[in-house]
Amino acid sequence: MDGIINILKPVGLTSYQMVHKVKRITGSRKAGHTGTLDPGAAGVLPVCIGNATKIAGFISDFDKSYRAEITFGLVTDTQDLYGRVLKKGDGSVSASEIEKLLEEFKGTVSQIPPMFSAVRHKGKRLYQLAREGKEIYRDPRQVSIYGLKLVDFISPNKALIDIECSKGTYIRTLCHDIGARSGCGAVMSFLVRIRSGPFELKDAVTIEELEEAADSKTIENYLYPIDYSIKHLEKIRINEKALKYAQNGNPLYSHNLAYIPRNLEAGQLVRIYCRDRFIAVGEVYKNNDEIIIGIKKLFYQRH
């Protein structure tokens, strides 16, 4: 079984546990997710099955969308409700104050990864060091906040916000930093991921639904084809005589191509097809005016 399942991760389970459940239900030996969700968060978790695990490296850079609840007047060491309380006080804010704060965090922002995170330091995860009572210096990271808006204000100290952001954005840290700017501190009190690239919450399947589908042998109904996740890439077609060259990882030249879109740029990634079969992900090279397609990752091989 090869493809991608858009799983709805519930609160309380790790992303790894969700992958393990999907492997058990589908009987797949290979599976992996494309972006960790904290145990306390819910939402979209695309899980690659079988040969689709090869695509994970190309889709982990997807932009993401979230809905988060911020609670003002509280600071914890995990930046959410599950940590040790460091500060507690009056978190009264107004909707207009929150909207002004959100404007300050749009665009490119600098974040320091939280100690309770999966970032590695000298072979150890930061959360492991944090549990040992250690805190180390972390280099700031630049992330992009494309959209940030107030959805609802729950007086006196809670707000629901929608976030559209780049890969690697810590929503807990965003909430913490917004709280720090407000002067009264804040934590992320709930989080749901509503989109990861082309995968959306409205289309996500629960583990229970997946189990029912496995029992009725209709699990393919929830399986997205491998190339669905990279449909934003330009599509090229090669002629059948060039198929064996592609399968051997050889570069493809103009005479190998049955169709190629105009205005391709050097370094651009493309989807490669032979007839209607998805073959590989390629990268565009140029030699003077000639377009050359290098094979980045092969997905179809003759057996």
Image (cartoon, rainbow, N blue to C red):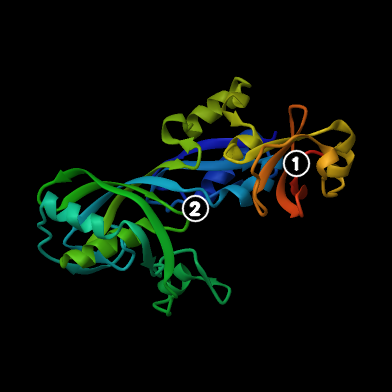
| 2 vs 1, front mark | 1
Q: Position of residue 9 (x, y in %)?
A: 45, 41
Q: Is residue 231 placed above or below 187 in the rendered structure?
A: above
Q: In this figure, which residue is indicated by the disc labeled 2?
A: 36
Give left or right: position of 149 versus 263: left
Q: Which mark is drawn over residue 18?
A: none
Disc 2 residue type?
Answer: Thr
Image quadrant occupied by the N terminus: top right
Please report whichever mark, 2 or 1, sits nearer to the chain's N-terminal start: 2
Give the SS element for disc 1. loop
In percent of the image, x 25 and y 60: which residue is there?
104
Q: Is residue 254 placed above or below 76 in the rendered structure?
A: above
| Residue 57 in view (yes/no) | yes
Residue in the foreground of this view, choosing between 258 and 61: 258
Give left or right: position of 89 versus 246: left
Disc 1 residue type?
Answer: Phe
Q: Is residue 228 placed above or below 253 in the rendered structure?
A: above
**Quarter occupied by residue 5:** top right
Q: Position of residue 71 (x, y in %)?
A: 21, 55
Label 2 environment density (alpha carbons within 10 Å; few <14, some 14–19, many ≥20): some
**Quarter occupied by residue 88:** bottom left
Q: In this figure, which residue is indicated by the disc labeled 1?
A: 299
Residue in the foreground of this view, choosing between 257 and 70: 257
